[in-house]
Image: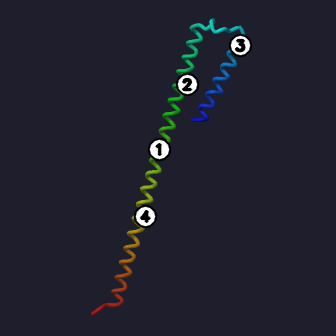
């Protein structure tokens, strides 16, 4: 988002520079309806583009968070399975030991 802000400020500065280079005799009193419409149009386009970029980045963040949760759940499941496998191996070893040394 910082990069987008920097790009926006650079483009704004470029537009102001080009405006003053193309109309050297412009005064604030000369501002008319076309100028206001251009400013409002630029704001509208900026809001639309910003909204789309925000929507895309939010979707990416949600997907990344979901993947992270799934990964943690898989790790927990793996630990549970390893623990169960260790318990089963221990029981089998005890049974083998009992079978080899039967008590009367």
Q: Mark 3 = which residue?
A: 22
Q: Is residue 51 left or right of residue 12?
A: left
Q: Secondary structure at mark 1?
A: helix
Q: Mark 1 = which residue?
A: 63
Distance (Cα) linking label 2 and label 1: 26 Å
Q: Earlier in the sequence, mark 3 or mark 2?
A: 3
Distance (Cα) linking label 1 and label 4: 24 Å
Q: Earlier in the sequence, mark 1 or mark 4?
A: 1
Q: Nearer the viewer, mark 1 or mark 3?
A: 3
Residue 12 sits in quarter: top right
Figure quadrant of the C terminus: bottom left
Q: Secondary structure at mark 2?
A: helix
Q: Mark 4 = which residue?
A: 79
For the residues bearing labels 3 and 2, Cβ distance under 8 angstroms? no
- The residue shown at (31%, 90%) is 102
Q: Is residue 72 left or right of residue 100?
A: right
Q: Is residue 93 above or below residue 79?
A: below
């Amino acid at each position: 988002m910082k990069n987008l802000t920097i790009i926006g400020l650079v483009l704004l500065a470029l537009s102001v520079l080009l405006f003053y280079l193309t109309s050297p005799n412009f005064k604030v009193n000369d501002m008319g309806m076309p100028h206001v419409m251009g400013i409002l149009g630029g704001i509208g386009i900026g809001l639309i583009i910003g909204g789309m970029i925000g929507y895309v980045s939010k979707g990416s963040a949600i997907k990344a968070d979901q993947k992270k949760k799934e990964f943690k759940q898989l790790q927990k499941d793996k630990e549970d399975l390893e623990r169960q496998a260790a318990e089963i191996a221990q029981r089998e070893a005890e049974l083998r030991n009992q079978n080899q040394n039967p008590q009367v």
